[in-house]
């Protein structure tokens, strides 16, 4: 529903923006276009990820969601660059933009964004992709407010620079959000440990588990939103039972650290996993 609402209003904003020559409307339309792309990619990626799992794709296609978020980042940077370049030319020769059109379209856009914002709020807590679209919609709300302000200024004073100034503001507002979303997506693709999780702390916690004599080859990464993965090798202390150690270590990682998918290999004291022979 958020996708359909946003797509429909984007068409309206593009048509009106170019018809009346408003950079504020065109930049806001470009911003909303990234919402449409982000929401569309989120829907497609989530559906494909859930439905495609095979003997070769053992994790399914969950990384498509992360790739979609990265593509959304590229779109955001592209739109911001277009708006800033176009704004420069508008400052040299500001066109005559009718404030009434800006005000009318911006008010409708604000209403659409509020509805989409409420629809996406819950899903943004669980999915990186939906969170990217949610943040875009939230900034669109502010963008619509900016366009409303430009419309009021044009109606009240006729000052021609109000429109390009608001356009630049929206363009600049896109950049830090695009950077944060892209950084988060790259962390997942590069299999960096989840933000806020200290692997050394996790290693020490495993070392302290009763029956563990040592920890090595510990890896922690994010597969996709809401699915953090850990693998590792646990060397047993003398006399420790492998099943008990495995149960305690797995429970620690899942319940205390919050990792959703845990795979641990338990080894006898002195066993060298790399060589595959006891030493």
Image (cartoon, rainbow, N blue to C red):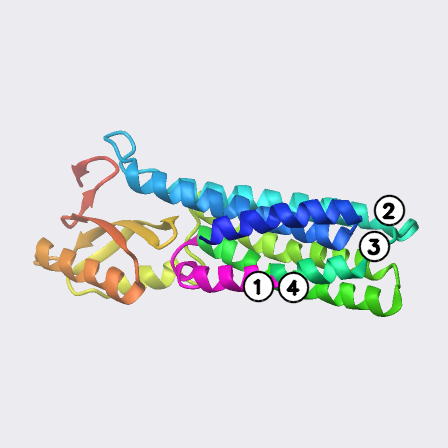
Asked whether the residues under the numbered discs 4 and 3 touch, taking CB atoms below 8 Å apart as contact, a structural biologist would say no
Comes first in the chain, label 4 or label 2: 2
Residue 189 position, x and y percent, is 45, 43
Question: Relative to the observer, which residue lies in front, 134 or 194?
Answer: 134
Residue that carries the numbered disc 3 in the rendered image? 97
Left or right for 99, reference 273: right
* Depth order, front residue of 97/47: 97
Report if the CB atoms under discs 2 and 3 are less than 8 Å apart: no
- Which sits earlier in the primary sequence, circle 1 or circle 2? 2
Residue 182's place in the image compared with 48, above or below, is below
Residue indicated by mark 1: 111
**Mark carried by residue 59:** none
Q: Which comes before the other along the chain, label 2 or label 3?
A: 2
Which label sits in the foreground, 4 or 2? 4
Residue indicated by mark 4: 107
Q: Name the residue furthest top.
A: 56
């Amino acid at each position: 529903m958020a996708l359909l609402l946003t797509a429909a209003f984007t068409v309206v904003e593009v048509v009106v923006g170019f018809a009346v020559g408003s950079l504020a409307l065109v930049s806001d339309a470009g911003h909303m276009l990234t919402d449409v792309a982000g929401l569309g990619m989120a829907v497609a990626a989530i559906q494909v990820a859930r439905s495609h799992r095979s003997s070769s794709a053992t994790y399914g296609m969950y990384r498509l969601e992360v790739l979609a978020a990265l593509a959304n980042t590229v779109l955001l940077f592209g739109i911001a660059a277009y708006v800033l370049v176009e704004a420069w030319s508008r400052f040299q020769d500001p066109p005559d933009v009718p404030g009434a059109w800006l005000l009318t379209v911006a008010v409708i856009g604000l209403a659409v964004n509020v509805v989409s914002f409420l629809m996406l709020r819950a899903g943004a807590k669980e999915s990186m992709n939906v969170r990217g679209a949610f943040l875009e919609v939230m900034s669109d709300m502010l963008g619509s407010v900016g366009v409303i302000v430009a419309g009021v200024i044009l109606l009240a004073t006729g000052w021609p620079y109000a429109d390009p100034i608001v356009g630049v503001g929206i363009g600049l507002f896109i950049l830090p959000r695009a950077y944060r979303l892209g950084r988060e997506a790259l962390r997942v693709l590069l299999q960096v440990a989840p933000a806020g999780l200290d692997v050394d702390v996790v290693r020490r916690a495993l070392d302290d588990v009763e029956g563990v004599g040592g920890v090595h080859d510990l890896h922690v990464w994010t597969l996709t939103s809401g699915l953090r993965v850990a693998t590792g090798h646990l060397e047993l202390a003398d006399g420790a039972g492998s099943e008990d150690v495995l149960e305690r270590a797995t429970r620690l990682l899942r319940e205390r650290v919050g990792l959703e998918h845990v795979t641990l290999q338990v080894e006898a004291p002195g066993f060298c996993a790399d060589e595959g022979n006891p030493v």
